[in-house]
C-alpha cells in the first residue's frame, strides 16, 4: 500500500489559512489506498520571536525524514528584513539542494490579466535555486560609515548550471512546443553569462528537437508583457528567475494562482512546494486569502511524488473553478477550498 | 553668445538613422543665437572590425572636450556578446562617471500600451550607473571544464549610493507628487540591501515632504503592470534599474519612445543621452526605425544643458505627434523627424 509522509509548514500570516485548504484538497483527491500522514512544523516569525531560532540542524533532520514539504508562507514585518528569508527559506533551499525551482505560468480561462488583448500564456520557468547571487557570499566593510563598501558575490558553477539546464531541456523536450529560452545578461555579466551560455549551447546539441533561444533579462521583461506566447520553457539563474517569475505570475492571473516547487530531482532530500505569494500580513486571519496557489502547489507536489492523475485532477478542478469564478459571489478562503475539494473528489 | 559643442555617436544599425533625426529636431528647436557645433565619432562594430578597438584613451580625451554626447545605438550580432557592451557602452559610463542614469516613463495620449484599462503612467527611474553588478568585478576559474566557477561581484559604496539617492530625492522633491520608491532586494542581498536601505532612510530625513516607500525588485515588476500609477520617482541599483526600465518602457509605449540620460551631475565629464532601444539590426537601413526615443533623448540633453524651454518644446511636439499618429499613415524615420522638426520650429 502506498503512503505520503508530508511535512507541513503553515508559517506566517495567510500561510496558515491557505495550507489548511491545500491539505483539504489533498485529502479529497487521494485514493483510499494511499495513506497520508502529515506532521506540522511551527516555523516562522512566532518561533523566531519565542526562541531566536529560524531553522536548526535538528529541524533539518526532522524535515529530512519526510517525503515532501508543503509550505504556506514565511515572513512578518515584526522580523527584520532578511532574517527569515536567509535564515529559513533560503537556508532550506540550500540545505536540501533544491536546485530546480519550478514555476509554471498559465493564464486560465476566466482569469483576469493586466494585459490587453487576449494573450495566450502557458510556460514554465526553471529557476536555478542554489547558486547565483543567492549564495550569501559577499560582505560589508566600514559598516555605517561614509566609507562603507558592500559586496554581493554571484557564484556560478558548471556543476550547478549544467544540472538545471539539463532539467530544463528534458522538460522542454516533453512539452508539445519543445522550445527552451535561456534568460541571462551575458552581455554585461560576462563571466557568469559565458558559463551559462556555453553550457546551454553544449547541452542543446543533445536535444536536436528542442528549439532554443537566448534573451537578455531586461528584454525578457518586455516580451513577458508584449509577447508572452513566445515562451514555452525558460531556464534562468536564481535572481533573474525570482524577478521574471513574479512578473510572469502578475501577467498570468496574479500571485493568487502562482504555484512553485523547490525540487531536488535526485530525491536525496525532500522537495518543497509553496505558493509564490508571501504571508500577506495585511489580510491575514480574515479568511480573504485565495488558497488556489497553494492548491496548485499541492498538484506540483503530487506530480513530483508520481501521482500524475491526481495532480491533473487538481489542476482541472482549479481550471473549472476559475472559469466559473466570475459568475460566483465572492468566497472566503475555506469556501474556495471546499469547492475545490468537492470537485477533485468528484 | 551661447553655444553647444556636441559629440555625436550614431553607432550601429538604426543608430545612424535615428541620430540624424535627433539632430534635425535639435537644429530646428535651437534659437538663432545658439551656435551648434557637432563632431561625429565612428564607434561601434565597424570600428571594432577594422581596428579591434572599442574606446581608447585618446577617444575618451576627444569626447571629453564636448559639452554633451548624443548616442544612437551600439551593438551588432557580428561582434561577440559583451565586447561592445563592456568595451564601449559601460566603459564610457564608468570613465565619465555617469552615475545618474535617468529614464523617464510617461504614457502619452494616443500611445498604445500592452496593459488593459487606461493606466496612468508618469514616473522617472533614477538608475545608479557606475556600481553594482556592472563593475566587471569577478572572474572565472577552470574555464570550459566541468569544474568551472564563474563569479560576478556587485560592488556598492556609501559614496556611490548616497550621491544617486540624493539626486533621486531632489528630483522627487521637485515633482508635484513628491514620492520616492527604493527598489532593491534587501531581504536576500542583505549586504548591499542594508547599505542602500540605510542611506535611503538617512537621506529621507532631510526631505520630510517626500513620501518614501521600499519595494523588492520582484514585487516592483508586479506593480509596474498592475499599478504603474503607484510610482513617481524610483531609485535603484544598476542591474535592477536595467531590468525595470525595459519593463517600464514596454508598458509606457514601447522602447520606440523611451529616452535616457547617462548623467554626471557635477559636469566634470560630458553626459551622454541615448534611446533605451538597441541597434535593431533586423530593421536597420530601411527607414523604419522610430526616431522618437532619440528625439526625446535630445530633450533630456537640452534640459541638462539648461535649455529648459527648448526641451519642453520638443516634448510637447512629441506628445502632439503621438496623439495624432493613430490617424496618420505609416511614416518613415525621416518623415517622423521632419514632422517633429516642423512642430518644434513652430
Ligand atoms: C522571500 C524571498 C527569499 C524569495 C526569493 O527571493 O526567492 C521569494 O521572493 C520567492 O520568489 O520565493
Ligand atoms: C547594452 C547594455 C550594456 C545596456 C545595459 O545593460 O545597461 C542596456 O541594456 C541599457 O539598458 O542601456
Image: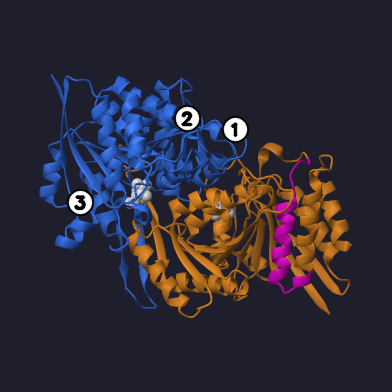
Chain colours: A orange, B blue
**Chain of the residue displaying label 3:** B
Q: Are marks 2 and 3 in contact (CB under 8 Å)?
A: no
Q: Is residue A167 above or below residue B191?
A: below
Q: Position of residue A133 (x, y in %)?
A: 44, 57
Q: Which residue is mark 3?
A: B43
Dot 2 crowding, Cα within 10 Å, few <14, some 14–19, many 20+: few
Q: CA distance from mark 1 to mark 3?
A: 41 Å
What percent of the width, then of the height, locates residue A239?
48, 55
Residue under label 2: B324
Instruction: Please say if the residues under marks 1 and 3 sit with CB atoms less than 8 Å apart.
Output: no
Q: Position of residue A51 (x, y in %)?
A: 62, 50
Q: Name which residue lies at 59% across and 53% down.
A: A53
Q: Which residue is mark 1?
A: B118
Q: Are labels 2 and 3 assigned to the same chain?
A: yes
- The secondary element bearing badge 3 is classed as loop
* Of A175 and B180, the residue lying toward us: A175
- In this view, the residue farthest toward the front is B329
Q: Nearer the viewer, mark 2 or mark 3?
A: 2
Q: Nearer the viewer, residue B69 or A19?
A: B69
Helix, strand or loop for disc 2? helix
* CA distance for labels 2 and 3: 36 Å
In the rendered image, which quarter is residue B206 located in? top left
For the C terminus of chain A, which image quadrant?
bottom right
From this viewpoint, is residue B130 visible?
no
Coordinates of residue B280 in the picture (x, y in percent): 36, 53
Q: Is residue A186 above or below residue A66?
A: above
Query: Foreground: A225 or B210?
Result: A225
Look at the numbered disc 1 and say if its residue's Cβ is closer than 8 Å to ligand 2: no
Q: Which comes sooner in the sequence, label 1 or label 3? A: 3
The answer to whether the beta carbon of the residue marked 2 is less than 8 Å from any atom of ligand 2 is no
Residue A298 in the magenta stretch? The answer is yes
What are the residue bounds of the magenta stretch?
A287-309
Amino acid at each position: 500500500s502506498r503512503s505520503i509522509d508530508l511535512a507541513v509548514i503553515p508559517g506566517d500570516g495567510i500561510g496558515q489559512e491557505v495550507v489548511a485548504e491545500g491539505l483539504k484538497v489533498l485529502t479529497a483527491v487521494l485514493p483510499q489506498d494511499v495513506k497520508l500522514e502529515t506532521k506540522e512544523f511551527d516555523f516562522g516569525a512566532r518561533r523566531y520571536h519565542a526562541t531566536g531560532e529560524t531553522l536548526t540542524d535538528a529541524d533539518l533532520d526532522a524535515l529530512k525524514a519526510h517525503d515532501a514539504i508543503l509550505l504556506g508562507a514565511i515572513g512578518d514585518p515584526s522580523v527584520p528584513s532578511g532574517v527569515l528569508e536567509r535564515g529559513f527559506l533560503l537556508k532550506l533551499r540550500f540545505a536540501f539542494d533544491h536546485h530546480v525551482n519550478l514555476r509554471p505560468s498559465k493564464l486560465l480561462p476566466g482569469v483576469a490579466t493586466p494585459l490587453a488583448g487576449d494573450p495566450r500564456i502557458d510556460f514554465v520557468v526553471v529557476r536555478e535555486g542554489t547558486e547565483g547571487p543567492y549564495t550569501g557570499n559577499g560582505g560589508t566593510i566600514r559598516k555605517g560609515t561614509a566609507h562603507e563598501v558592500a559586496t554581493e558575490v554571484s557564484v556560478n558553477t558548471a556543476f550547478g548550471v549544467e544540472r538545471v539546464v539539463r532539467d530544463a531541456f528534458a522538460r522542454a523536450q516533453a512539452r508539445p512546443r519543445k522550445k527552451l529560452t535561456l534568460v541571462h545578461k551575458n552581455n554585461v555579466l560576462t563571466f557568469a553569462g559565458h558559463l551559462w551560455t556555453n553550457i546551454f549551447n553544449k547541452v542543446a546539441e543533445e536535444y536536436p528537437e528542442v528549439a532554443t533561444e537566448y534573451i537578455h533579462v531586461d528584454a525578457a521583461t518586455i516580451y513577458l508583457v508584449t509577447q508572452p506566447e513566445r515562451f514555452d520553457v525558460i531556464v534562468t539563474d536564481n535572481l533573474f528567475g525570482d524577478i521574471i517569475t513574479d512578473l510572469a505570475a502578475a501577467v498570468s492571473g496574479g500571485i493568487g494562482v502562482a504555484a512553485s516547487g523547490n525540487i531536488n530531482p535526485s530525491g536525496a532530500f525532500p522537495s518543497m512546494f509553496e505558493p509564490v505569494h508571501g504571508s500577506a500580513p495585511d489580510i491575514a486571519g480574515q479568511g480573504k486569502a485565495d488558497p488556489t496557489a497553494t492548491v496548485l502547489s499541492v498538484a506540483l507536489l503530487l506530480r513530483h511524488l508520481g501521482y500524475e492523475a491526481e495532480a491533473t485532477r487538481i489542476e482541472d478542478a482549479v481550471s473549472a473553478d476559475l472559469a466559473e469564478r466570475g459568475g460566483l459571489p465572492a468566497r472566503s478562503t475555506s469556501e474556495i477550498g471546499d469547492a475545490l475539494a468537492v470537485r477533485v473528489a468528484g
